[in-house]
Amino acid sequence: MIAATRLAPLRLRRVFGSHPSGVVFIAAVVDGQPFGLVASSFTSVSLEPALVSACVAHTSTTWPTLRAAPVLGVSVLAADQEPVVRQLASSGDRFAGLPWRANDDGAVMLDGAAAWLEVSVEQQVRAGDHNIVVLAVRDLEAVPEVAPLVFHGGRFTRLHP
């Protein structure tokens, strides 16, 4: 048995943080209002069918509203959007002053992102203190010349050529 101190939350966070990850904003318009949340646990799952996943904390107060939306937008945040991600992760008006657009189905995408995906919830799996949310990709687009924002070692950083 592994000692509890070996798996202390601060140690886990430090070790998990040694693996760099992209940062995404998952959002939709629900009942005429935009809702969204930031996730750094986003990854591709399958090419056929096209699936991605994100992990969402059980404590999220936004996810219950978002998961009911028929379509969600996923914006892969760009390296120059660090101030944006801080606003999006706040508890205030996440969308105040930010340029965004919604498609006809209500999927919200942020302007200036490195990539966008239009997705729908395929499956949720309860896993510890998070849900693993599998998302079916309906449409997507990337801007190859825009570098993504990266989260590594507990801070935001950029990829270097």
Image (spheres, helix red, strand yellow):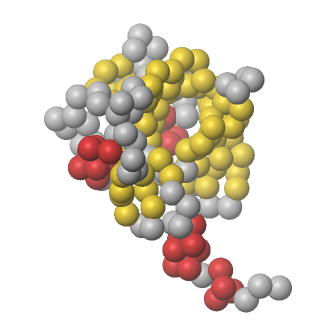
Residue occupying the far top of the picture: 104
State the image coordinates of residue 132 (x, y, percent, origin top left): 65, 47
Horizontal arrangement in the rendering, residue 98 relative to residue 36 (left or right): left
Is residue 99 at least partly visible in the picture? yes
Is residue 43 toward the left or the right of residue 102 in the image?
right
x, y (%) of residue 38? 42, 46
In this rendered view, identify the residue nearer to me: 2 or 92: 2
Residue 122 seen by the camera: no
Which residue is rendered at x = 46% and y = 14% of the image? 105
Q: Residue at point 38% right, 51% down? A: 160
Number of numbered callouts drawn = 0
84 up-or-down from 137: above or below: below
Q: Which residue, as the protein is rendered here, is positioned at the far right?
A: 1
Query: In this image, 40 relative to 122: left or right?
Result: left
Residue at image x 42%, y 19%? 106
| Location of residue 156 in the rendering, given as x and y in whole percent from the top left corner | 36, 57
Q: Which residue lies furthest to the front in this view?
A: 161
> Residue 38 or 50: which is nearer the viewer?
50
State whether residue 5 is above or below residue 66. below
Residue depicted at 16% across the width and 35% down the height: 97
Q: Quadrant of residue 157?
A: bottom left
The N terminus: image quadrant: bottom right
Residue 26, quarter of the rendered image: top left
Looking at the image, is 126 positioned above or below residue 31? below
Q: Where is residue 10 shown, x and y percent of the image?
A: 52, 78
